[in-house]
């Protein structure tokens, strides 16, 4: 039987198949899992280093402005270090003052907290839960347990001396290295232009996101503090600071920030104050996070709402509470390394929420929807029996 002339000749090499897509996906997931577990294992080092990087990126324009005006490199570096220290010290002082006021406030409402815990435990028992679960909930409402929980929550940021030493040291070293960033990027563009552009874009996105979120979060915290002060809710300054911190947690930060003032408002003024807190927080949150924040931040980071929410959950599981605060910059860094630095994969940015490449398709879809709506209105019969 003669061989098929259309088939490959015996002397031709048979092409070897590439790695199956399923294998590639499994290898990528396995590598991502190993990387996440590794980062979680060293989060005591990774978190302060990345926090120092974010602070350094935010204060870098100070150096650039000074060098553009002829200030010597050494003075610009020292000023950048001082600016980074000022940001870190300011955040630490505000957090420590808020924690001190919270610690002094709790014992004053210990009886009310005990009564609230007892009511919840009684309700759980009537709902069918065991007495052990009810007692666990009751014990959680003691001032000591609550203060311990808050201290552990903030300990990742300000509680450990070693963490502060790492952050301060990294601020100095990164500020010194920051003087060579412009020359390094120029050198990198000669060999890897896409990578240089990607890291420049990452710095710009992180700076715009952090600065804009800080300004809007500070305004949100001040408004909340003023309203809570007028409502005579205990610890108004503490809850204003909490609102500012939670503004860095997309999607779910509002729900975290409203719980303590809601509880203390109910304990001090009853349900009318609690309802006022819900109303005020809802209005302020809706205006800032639903109208103002997307306009100034959403276009900068180009992350979809779903990916942003998943990133908060993921980085909180990997790095703890501070991971939820740094979720957006961390996700931007991952996208920069995996997508933006490789020209063959830039088209995948649209899958992460970047609308730049699909704006025309979205516009055509909106135009088609409006056209169908106009046709339905024109086909609708008029009360006199004619068509519109």
Image (cartoon, rainbow, N blue to C red):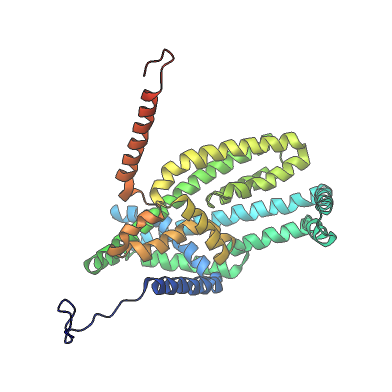
Picture coordinates of residue 71 (x, y %)?
32, 56
Instruction: Using the rendered image of the protein, determine whether residue 63 is visible from the camera's viewpoint.
Output: no
Horizontal placement of 155 versus 78: left or right? right
The image quadrant of residue 282 is top right
The image quadrant of residue 273 is top right
Image quarter of the C terminus: top left
Image quarter of the N terminus: bottom left
Which residue is pictured at 37% across the width and 71% down the height?
A: 21
Instruction: Using the rendered image of the protein, determine whether residue 122 is visible from the camera's viewpoint.
Output: yes
- Give the residue furthest to the top: 384
The image quadrant of residue 53 is bottom left
Which residue is pictured at 38% across the width and 66% down the height?
A: 176
Picture coordinates of residue 129 (x, y %)?
80, 57
Q: Nearer the viewer, residue 385 or 372?
A: 385
- Give the residue furthest to the left: 5
Picture coordinates of residue 29 (x, y %)?
46, 71
Count of numbered tags:
0
Horizontal placement of 158 versus 87: left or right? right
Horizontal placement of 188 versus 352: left or right? left
């Amino acid at each position: 039987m003669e061989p098929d002339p259309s088939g490959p000749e015996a002397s031709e090499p048979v092409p070897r198949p590439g790695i199956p897509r399923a294998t590639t996906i499994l290898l990528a997931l396995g590598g991502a899992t190993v990387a996440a577990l590794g980062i979680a294992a060293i989060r005591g080092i990774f978190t302060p280093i990345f926090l120092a990087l974010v602070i350094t990126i935010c204060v870098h324009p100070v150096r650039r402005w000074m060098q553009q005006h002829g200030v010597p490199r050494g003075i610009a570096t020292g000023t950048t270090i001082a600016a980074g220290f000022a940001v870190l010290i300011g955040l630490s002082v505000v957090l420590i003052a808020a924690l001190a006021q919270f610690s002094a406030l709790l014992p004053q409402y210990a009886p009310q907290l005990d009564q609230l815990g007892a009511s919840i435990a009684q309700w759980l028992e009537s709902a069918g839960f065991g007495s052990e679960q009810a007692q666990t909930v009751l014990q959680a409402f003691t001032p000591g347990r609550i203060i311990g929980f808050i201290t552990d929550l903030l300990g990742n940021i300000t509680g450990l001396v070693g963490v502060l030493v790492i952050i301060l040291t990294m601020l100095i070293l990164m500020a010194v290295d920051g003087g060579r960033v412009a020359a390094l990027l120029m050198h990198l563009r000669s060999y890897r232009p896409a990578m240089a552009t990607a890291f420049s874009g990452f710095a710009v996105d992180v700076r715009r996101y952090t600065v804009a979120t800080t300004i809007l979060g500070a305004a949100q915290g001040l408004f909340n503090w003023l309203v809570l002060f007028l409502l005579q809710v205990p610890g108004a300054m503490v809850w204003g600071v909490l609102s500012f911190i939670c503004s860095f947690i997309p999607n779910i930060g509002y729900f975290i920030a409203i719980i303590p003032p809601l509880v203390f408002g109910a304990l001090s003024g009853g349900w009318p104050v609690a309802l006022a807190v819900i109303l005020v927080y809802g209005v302020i949150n809706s205006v800032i996070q639903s109208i103002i924040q997307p306009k100034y931040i959403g276009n900068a980071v180009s992350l979809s709402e779903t990916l942003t929410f998943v990133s908060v959950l993921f980085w909180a599981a990997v790095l703890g509470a501070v991971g939820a605060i740094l979720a957006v910059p961390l996700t931007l860094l991952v996208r920069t390394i995996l997508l933006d630095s490789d020209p063959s994969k830039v088209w995948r940015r649209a899958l992460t929420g970047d609308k730049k490449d699909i704006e025309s398709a979205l516009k055509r879809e909106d135009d088609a929807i409006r056209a169908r709506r106009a046709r339905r209105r024109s086909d609708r019969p008029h009360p006199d029996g004619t068509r519109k």
